[in-house]
């Protein structure tokens, strides 16, 4: 089973959206028995909380339910459990690289490395309005499509 972890700062906006989008694509492709996904935050501020209501609303508008997800913090064992650890931005990437054992660092990348965009960071929409969540959805959806294509070609 290929294991994918999406990581942002608090695990209530970007990474839960990415997890939900990716799970949806995996299920639609009939690969749920071969590919698993989770999400986490580098910080512990929101542990146990559901995704931000705005993140839930945007994903629900597109037929994806993320309401049952609960925020958690990245744990040391995540670096050995997951085949892909995908950060939403450069700050979280640096935090993950600093926390990961040397051998696990090759599995840590930016999510947008798999997308068809020139952007490198998925912007944090927390302090903005609904348009920011729309932008995040579009970015993570594009990257999730590319990630699934990559996994199908290289890991299955």
Image (spheres, rainbow, N blue to C red):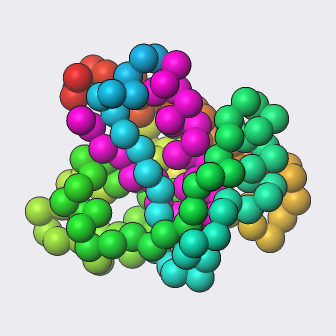
Q: Is residue 139 visible?
A: yes
The part of the image, by quadrant, that contains residue 20 is: top right
Query: On screen, 141 above or below 136?
Result: above
In the image, residue 119 above or below residue 115: below
Q: Quadrant of the N terminus?
A: top left
Give x and y (percent) for residue 77: 24, 67
Q: Residue furthest front?
A: 68
**Magenta residue span:** 1-28
Residue at (31% x, 22% y) in the render: 152
> Looking at this view, is 115 or 44 the one in front?
44
Residue 61 picture location, percent across and down: 81, 35
- Kindly tell me whether residue 122 is visible in this rendering: no
* Quarter of the figure with residue 123: bottom right
146 is within the stretch colored magenta:
no
Residue 55: x, y in percent? 74, 53
In this rendering, the answer to whether 138 lies above or below 94 is above
Q: Nearer the viewer, residue 38 or 129?
A: 38
Name the residue: 68% across, 40% down: 65
Find residue 70 and report its horizontal and vertical position in percent.
Answer: 57, 62
Identify the image quadrant of residue 101.
bottom left
Q: Residue furthest top?
A: 29
Q: Residue furthest bottom?
A: 45
Q: Is residue 125 left or right of residue 68?
A: right
Q: Is residue 21 magenta?
A: yes
Query: Which residue lies at the image location 33% right of the left edge and 27% below the top edge?
Result: 33
């Amino acid at each position: 089973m290929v294991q994918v972890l999406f990581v942002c700062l608090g695990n209530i906006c970007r990474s839960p959206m990415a997890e939900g989008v990716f799970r949806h694509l995996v299920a639609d492709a009939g690969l749920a028995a071969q590919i698993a996904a989770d999400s986490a935050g580098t910080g512990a501020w929101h542990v146990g909380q559901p995704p931000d209501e705005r993140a839930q609303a945007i994903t629900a508008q597109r037929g994806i339910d993320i309401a049952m997800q609960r925020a958690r913090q990245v744990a040391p064992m995540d670096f050995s459990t997951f085949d892909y650890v995908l950060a939403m931005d450069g700050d979280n990437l640096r935090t993950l690289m600093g926390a990961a054992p040397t051998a696990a660092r090759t599995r840590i990348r930016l999510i947008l490395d798999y997308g068809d965009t020139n952007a490198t960071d998925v912007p944090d929409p927390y302090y903005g309005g609904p348009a920011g969540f729309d932008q995040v959805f579009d970015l993570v959806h594009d990257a999730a499509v590319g990630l699934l294509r990559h996994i199908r070609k290289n890991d299955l």
